[in-house]
Image (cartoon, coloured by chain):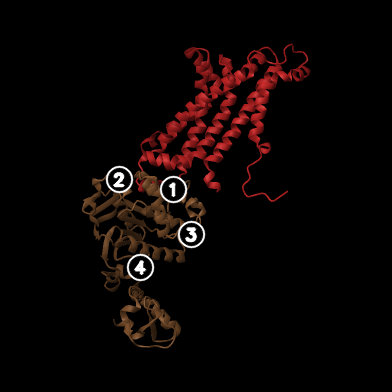
Chain colours: A red, B brown
């Protein structure tokens, strides 16, 4: 072995994100190939591999739910976090934090049940429940991230002649980004798991094999759904960890 | 020219600056000095509207600062603070480009200006421009802070105890640097400090504040030679102000030309307080004085230090 140069690109073989993403792809496209395995594990089942929908279409639908609800939670959560850390919005801080906490304290299943009579079955009640559920970590981390920006930096931004918007965009948000992204990471990871529940109200997601499996006493389906949800959550979590590192790379140099 | 006209400021009914009237001539270094809580930083911050006076006004070049939008005003005034306040996520170069970019300068012009400033503040050795603030020493950070304040070529520089957090050696070096930059640029500088030696060294005009009120203002020699009251006398060093007074002059002012003295000569630019200290250390009552090039000029006598 020769001496390692100071900055080596990590080999993809040692990259947990690559492994996790690879596992996800293998599971999505290779599940039918695992039929003998599941047949051996669950010999009493007639159909040991879920075949209702292609796994890739379930994955896309699941990703769509998570992306749409997380995007809404980011817009609302970061927006609210910015608002309550401005002088004019400081009065709303308690209220916003309480609402965000209530959104998470309320079980998503209950939100789903309550939304269905109003909005009918499908993706809409699922999106609302997921958005509410994902708000808290984003609001909290946005507030925490903006508050830890040093006073000297804020003073420098103002005294350089930045407008309030320039100060926010050029100084405060980039410095708060690692903390905000950490909140988004928690929110997204939780939502990947919670989105599986959306299939109880008729939305397509990786929860479908789980629900069908539970209803028809098919443990193999449950296992397949759980494996896919787990692999997706892990992949997204690792991807966000990388994004957080990217947002604070100036610190590492 | 900066003018304070009966400027006052109170926070929650507590007066911090009271009826301050003061003029700092264009192109000079003015120093606001006082103990902590004297109101000097508040007064300074009135100039770039970080603080709005409760009564009275501040004028720059005859125009009330109220007449400008705060952002536009601040882009024309350099501001340096003790905690430096560099943007930690930006490189040295990007930090220095802050105000020029806000003003929408073309890239070429910004690049050229940064080169100029790196040179002016002696930051051009090594690869500093691409570094992040946390990779710099305290002294380097403050140099970058000064460079950033100068970047858009403002006529006016406000400095709030900028060297207060530095070690004495770095501090002295940066004071010298500031004087050099001032000579090179001719900026009007308003400087806040609580250190009388710093005020004497840098200021052509010193204003002493106490609990929000102006106590005495004038050239540093005036405060030292003729303190207005006991507070000023104590603040400028009590009996020791005699030594500080000597510090405002150099060997050139008491030179006996043509006289030769044995022993190691001193440069003509040596301050008189250090010349006196040297006489005590050497146990002599006269020193040989040489010019910049080392040519003998004359002698400095102990007796002449007490009587100009």
Q: Disc 4 versus disc 3: distance between alpha carbons?
A: 27 Å
Percent position of residue B284, x then y: 42, 87
Q: Are marks 3 and 2 on the same chain?
A: yes
Tell me the quarter of the picture where residue B143 sits: bottom left
Tag 3 subunit: B
- Tell me the element at label 3: loop
For numbered disc 4, what is the local secondary structure? helix
Report the disc number at residue B72. 2
Q: Is residue B202 above or below residue B72?
A: below
Residue A77 visible in this rendered orientation of the protein: yes
- Identified at 56% across, 47% down, the residue is A252
Residue in the image at 34% along x and 59% along y: B192
Q: Quadrant of residue A94?
A: top left
Instruction: Verify CB contact (< 8 Å) between mark 3 and mark 1.
Output: no
Q: CA distance from mark 3 to mark 2?
A: 33 Å
Where B306 sits versus B82, above or below?
Answer: below
* Mark sitting on residue B125: 3
- Do the CB atoms of the residues marked 4 and 3 lie less than 8 Å apart? no
Q: Which residue is mark 4?
A: B201
Residue in the image at 38% along x and 35% along y? A89
First in sequence: mark 3 or mark 2? 2
Q: Which dot, 4 or 2, sits closer to the camera?
A: 2
Query: Is residue B257 placed above or below A177 in the rendered structure?
Result: below
Instruction: Point out the frontmost of discs 4 and 3.
Output: 3
Query: In terms of depth relative to the viewer, which is nearer, A49 or B295?
Result: B295
Q: Secondary structure at mark 2?
A: helix
């Amino acid at each position: 072995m020769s001496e390692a140069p100071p900055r080596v690109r990590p080999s993809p073989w040692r990259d947990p994100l690559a492994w996790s993403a690879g596992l996800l792809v293998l599971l999505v496209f290779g599940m039918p190939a695992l039929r003998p395995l599941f047949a051996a594990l669950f010999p009493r089942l007639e159909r040991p591999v879920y075949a209702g929908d292609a796994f890739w279409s379930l994955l896309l639908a699941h990703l769509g739910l998570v992306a749409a609800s997380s995007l809404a939670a980011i817009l609302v959560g970061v927006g609210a976090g910015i608002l309550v850390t401005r002088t004019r919005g400081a009065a709303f801080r308690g209220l916003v934090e309480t609402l965000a906490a209530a959104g998470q304290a309320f079980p998503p299943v209950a939100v789903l049940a309550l939304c269905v009579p109003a909005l009918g079955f499908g993706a809409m009640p699922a999106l609302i429940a997921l958005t509410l559920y994902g708000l808290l970590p984003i609001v909290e981390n946005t507030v925490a991230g903006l508050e830890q920006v040093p006073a000297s930096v804020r003073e420098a931004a103002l005294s350089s002649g930045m407008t309030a918007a320039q100060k926010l965009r050029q100084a405060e948000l980039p410095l708060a980004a690692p903390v905000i992204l950490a909140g988004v990471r928690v929110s997204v990871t939780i939502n990947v798991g919670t989105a599986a529940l959306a299939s109880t109200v008729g939305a397509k997601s990786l929860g479908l094999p789980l629900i069908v499996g539970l209803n028809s006493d098919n443990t193999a389906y449950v296992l397949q759904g759980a494996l896919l949800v787990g692999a997706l959550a892990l992949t997204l979590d690792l991807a966000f960890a990388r994004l957080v590192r990217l947002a604070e790379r100036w610190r590492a140099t | 020219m900066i003018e304070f006209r009966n400027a006052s400021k109170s926070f929650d009914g507590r007066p911090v600056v009271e009826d301050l009237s003061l003029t700092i001539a264009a192109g000079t270094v003015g120093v606001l000095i006082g103990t902590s809580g004297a109101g000097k930083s508040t007064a300074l911050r009135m100039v770039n509207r970080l603080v709005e006076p409760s009564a009275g006004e501040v004028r720059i070049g005859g125009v009330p600062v109220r007449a400008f939008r705060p952002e536009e005003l601040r882009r024309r005034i350099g501001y340096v603070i003790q905690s430096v306040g560099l943007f930690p996520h930006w490189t040295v170069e990007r930090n220095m480009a802050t105000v020029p970019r806000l003003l929408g300068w073309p890239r070429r012009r910004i690049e050229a200006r940064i080169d100029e400033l790196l040179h002016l503040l002696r930051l051009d050795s090594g690869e500093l421009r691409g570094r992040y603030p946390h990779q710099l020493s305290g002294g380097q950070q403050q140099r970058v802070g000064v460079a950033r304040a100068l970047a858009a070529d403002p006529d006016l520089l406000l400095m709030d105890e900028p060297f207060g957090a530095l070690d004495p050696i770095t501090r002295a070096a940066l004071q010298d640097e500031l004087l050099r930059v001032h000579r090179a640029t001719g900026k009007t500088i308003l400087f806040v400090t609580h250190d009388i030696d710093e005020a004497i060294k840098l200021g052509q005009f010193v204003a002493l504040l106490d609990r929000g009120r102006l106590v005495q203002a004038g050239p540093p020699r005036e405060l030292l030679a003729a303190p207005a009251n006991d507070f000023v006398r104590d603040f400028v060093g009590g009996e020791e102000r005699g030594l500080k007074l000597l510090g405002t002059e150099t060997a050139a002012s008491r030179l006996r030309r043509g006289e030769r003295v044995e022993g190691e000569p001193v440069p003509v630019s040596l301050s008189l307080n250090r010349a006196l200290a040297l006489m005590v250390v050497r146990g002599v009552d006269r020193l040989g004085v040489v010019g910049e090039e080392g040519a003998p000029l004359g002698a400095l006598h102990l007796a002449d230090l007490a009587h100009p």
